[in-house]
Amino acid sequence: MGRRPNVYKDFPESPGIYIYSQDSIPIYVGKAINLKRRVASYFRINLEVKTRRMMEEAQNISYIKVGNELEALLLEAKLIKLYQPKYNIIAKDDKHPLYIQITKDQYPIIKTVRKNDLNQAPNLATYGPFPSSTNVRSVLKMIRRIFPFADHKIGKKACLYSQIGLCNPCPNEINNNQDPIGKQIQISNYKNNIRHVKSLLDGKIDYVKSELQKEMDNNSKNQKYEDALAIRNKIHELEYITKESTNVDEYLENPNLGEDIRDGEIKELGKILKSFKLLTSLPKRIECYDIAHLQGTHATASMITFVNGEPEKQYYRHFRIRQSKGNDDYASMKEVAERRKKHFADWGRPDLIIVDGGKGQLSMFKKTLETEGIPIIGLAKRFETLIIPTDYLGTATFREHRLPRGHALHLVQRMRNEAHRFARVYHHKLFKSSLFESKD
């Protein structure tokens, strides 16, 4: 492949796996949270000798987009095990590869082991090899906060991790429980946690979410509201670390699954908006807007742009709100719409605009751009509801459409979250700068 610096220019800025190949045979497999940024790092001038040699031998680089860091970690391990790429095998960490193992004890423990320590005792499952011990421990740490588990043998006292909720219930505590019914409940809870962790490591992320949803519904029906609330919190935490999720094995069957999912998202959203006669064709370029301020101070707005379901950061824009009432979201949205209207020629025109907010924010945007012919919808945070402007008997009204779980919901959530993140970045920058401004 040589040193062609533009080879990665069309790579997405999303999680995934990248594969360097020689004669169509993988010679190195790596994972990345941001594929474009990670692959770009290989084109620096100063590379380690081994990395430089790999780059000289590689004739091609490909990638597989995934939904989140956990999927990337698991898919990386599966591909390394499948292809045995030579530069993964001779990597420094792989002299003693790291694995995750779930033991077959009375109270199974989850631990990381080196290759030399594998199969020293019966186990329920083994995962790996993983090329980066740091990544493995980071992901396990995230999972453990949701589904606590032990990594120690049975002892007399509850372990230190039990005091901070990472080993709960602790097998030592279970063993010392003299209440038969209470002990059985603890055993069931502990083994449930192990089962969920195993399913996650098997790549069955949606299955785990579905199981938790059933548990939450059953507790709610039985009026065990505290238990239902605790499970709901687990679902939210799991969604946070996995975001959109897919069974990892599906990426092995279809390396273009990421693109297929994005196509499905756009088609599903387009179908919904076509049913309201808001669109006649699929929206290729979508812009999303959000406002950020702290009690009216340092108000900012963001414009983020997705093209074909992927972020296109060259089209992102920040706005520093100029109007005096920074806590007036309606007036702020009106100002942003007016400023955006001046740049259709040089910034380009979107096929669809999403405004983070309800009818008020949407009305301001729509009224300002009503002569432009661009479809505009709102997204209300409560229940992830689309606010859709309609014309009923000559009167402008709004209809609400609550998005069910699925592709369209994933797309608008990703856009809304990205717009919120981008707005907060600029807001924090302005706020931080104000702290250092000299005062007379």
Image (cartoon, grey):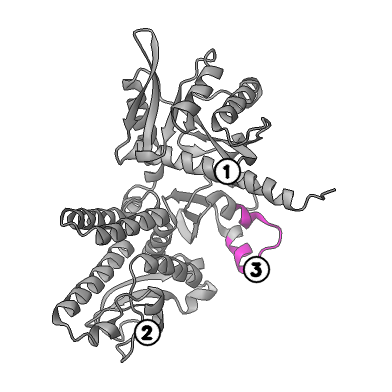
Q: Amino acid at mark 3?
A: Val
Q: Which mark is residue 49?
A: 3
Q: Is residue 41 magenta?
A: yes
Task: Identify the secondary structure beneath mark 1.
Answer: helix
Q: Which mark is residue 159?
A: 2
In the image, which is nearer the foreground, mark 1 or mark 3? Answer: 1
Q: CA distance from mark 1 to mark 2?
A: 41 Å
In the picture of the structure, the residue carrying the numbered disc 1 is 422
- Give the image location of residue 307, x and y in percent: 50, 33
Left/right of residue 435 with respect to residue 194 in the rendered view: right
The answer to whether any part of residue 23 appears in the image is no
Q: As displayed, is residue 136 above or below residue 435?
A: below
Q: Is residue 330 magenta?
A: no
- Give the image location of residue 54, x and y in percent: 57, 62
| Residue at the right extreme, as displayed | 440
Q: The magenta stretch spans which residues?
A: 40-54
Question: Measuring 65% from the left and 52% from the top, which residue is drawn there?
Answer: 3
Quadrant of residue 276 within the rendered picture = top left
Question: Measuring 55% from the left and 52% from the top, which residue is drawn there?
Answer: 59
Mark 1 near mark 3, Cβ–Cβ under 8 Å? Answer: no
Number of residues whose C-alpha sits closer than 10 Å to that of mark 1, classed few (under 14), some (14–19) or many (20 or more): many
